[in-house]
Amino acid sequence: MKHFIYLVPLFLMLFCANNAFAQKVEERRLDTQARAVDAISSVYVLPLTVKVNIVKTPGAEANGRIKNTIHLTKEEANASLHGDITNIRSYGIFKTAEKFNVDVIVAPTFIYQTSQDGSGYDLTIIGYPGNFYDWQPATTADYEWIRLDQTRLTGSKEIEPLQKKK
């Protein structure tokens, strides 16, 4: 019982001391929201039309068609071009146009196959080399062709009437 009498004041002292040193914690928060109005600009481009001149290049067939084979290593085809046939074809057209110093390869066809030695792939591009000339703003008559081409690209079956905006 003697120990109990000594322990009670000790517990009371600890309890009071603990409450004396306890600090009041105050938490404040602020949340705001603002709406920013972005500056949006629209660009309207006047369509252009251009003519293509099929050029005669050295090494072309009698009808003007050229044939160019590009060798791609497996690393170039798979890493650089991601193994995507669309990227490979675009790269082939670019390199062929660069080789023949022309703007475009008209009606290109492609042969893509593993090379004979198995070290990579051979991409053969066959087409007609051409250069652009006579750039002109599109006329009203050209707009129907432009709309038809957009319909072909988007896959939409509907052709909406052309309305001239003022």
Image: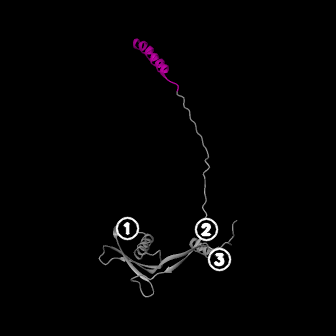
Toward the bottom, the furthest residue is 62
Tags 1 and 2 touching, CB below 8 Å: no
Q: Residues within 10 Å of mark 3 (few under 14, many from 20)?
A: few
Left or right: where 37 falls relative to 13? right
Q: Residues within 10 Å of mark 1 (few under 14, many from 20)?
A: some
* Distance Cα–Cα, label 2 vs label 3: 14 Å
Q: Earlier in the sequence, mark 1 or mark 2?
A: 2
Quadrant position of the C terminus in the picture: bottom right
Q: Earlier in the sequence, mark 1 or mark 3?
A: 1
Which tag is nearer the camera, tag 1 or tag 2? 2
Mark identifier at residue 78: 1
- Of the pair 65 and 134, the residue shown nearer to us: 134
Mark identifier at residue 141: 3
* Mark 1: amino acid: Asn
Q: Is residue 87 above or below residue 110?
A: above
Where residue 44 appears, as percent x and y from the top left, is 61, 64
Segment tinted magenta in the rendering? 1-24
* Distance Cα–Cα, label 1 vs label 3: 44 Å
The secondary element bearing badge 2 is classed as loop
Where residue 11 appears, as percent x and y from the top left, is 44, 17
* Mark 3: amino acid: Ala
The secondary element bearing badge 3 is classed as helix
Left or right: where 28 falls relative to 61? right
